[in-house]
Image (cartoon, grey):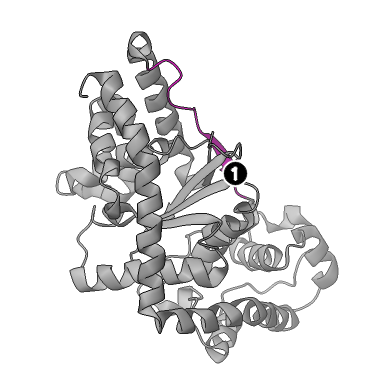
Amino acid sequence: MSSNNKKRVFSGVQPTGSLHLGNYLGAIKNFVNLQNDFDCLYCIVDLHAITVWQNPVNLRANILDVASAYLACGIDPKKSIIFVQSSVPHHVELSWIFNCISRIGWLNRMTQFKEKAGKNKEKVSAGLYIYPNLMAADILLYLADLVPVGDDQKQHLELTRDIAQKFNNDYSEFGGKDFFPIPEPLILDESSRVMSLRDGTKKMSKSETSSMTRIELKDENDLIIKKISKAKTDAFPIPESIDELGNRPEVKNLLNIFSSLSEVPVLNILNNYAGKQFSDFKKDLSDLLIARLEPIRNELIRIEGDNGYLRDVLEDGAIRANEKSERNIKEIRKIIGLG
């Protein structure tokens, strides 16, 4: 636990393209809400991004884009530490130590690697395979107590917990007993999981070719209206009960987006719109999206015009993150016999 007696939260976002509604509702909105009650570190995980090839020019720009989005969405650099992963070298050092503690069998069970590698797993980078060990290092380097996770990251957090426990056990006679806290998941509300506007079974993604599958944080109001009006639904009216959403993924997705933005339960929304056609609902959803995202877009534009401010925030964050991590890595080196 952090020295101010608040529990410590660590999380991060990859800088791999234009940020969208899924990044906001699935991560950044929650980061903003957590910073008043917890000691928060919010990282731009650029080392994770390079597990697949990135254009260096785009990567540099995307790092600043994520930093801008953190700030524009309401993360306060006075309350939270905002920093770039690669500016703190201890992440890499600890990830190597964890490469030597983590077991091949554990990594072989990671379903996300299997999904990303597909049939070409012999050709993907070794970094993509050992990515979960770096994620564990990100979290445990700061002795984090809590990690906000969606369904797709639960397995990685389980691995982080296994690594922490194995380190504590392996080095229990050398000062390592209970050294790492066993981080707990902060499970995000299901309504914060945002799916594609064209396929309710797939997550909203930066990598989809068509931008009509997602609402980007920089989208103009007219484009938001267009994307929502063209978002896939089905031929039936809005249902009365949540049970009826089971085989209507696109409808469920739009209702979840409305719920997460308005912070009103899906059941209440169904009560308001049950039996109606989608035109009224989509108009209200567009209005809600514009009300939430227009101030963020305006702030993004303002921040992007002030590169000096952005770099100051990241430099200050790197200094503060390095101070915390330096203390912990020195103790880790000592425990395992390297210092």
Q: Quadrant of residue 79?
A: bottom right
The residue positioned 51% from the left and 75% from the top of the image is: 215
From the viewer's perspective, is 329 left or right of 267? Answer: left
Quarter of the image with the C terminus in it = top left
Percent from the top left, x then y, of residue 120?
19, 49
- Mark 1: amino acid: Ile
Tell me the residue at 84%/70% (across/down). 272
Is 271 situated above or below 231?
Answer: above
Q: For residue 186: magenta? A: yes
| Residue 280 coordinates in the image, percent (x, y) | 75, 83
Q: How many marks?
A: 1
User: x, y percentage for residue 147?
Assistant: 51, 42
Segment colored magenta: 176-188
Question: For the point 40% across and 51% down, which residue is it?
Answer: 320
Left or right: 106 with respect to 243? left
Q: Which residue is mark 1?
A: 187
**What secondary structure predominates along the stretch shown in magenta?**
loop
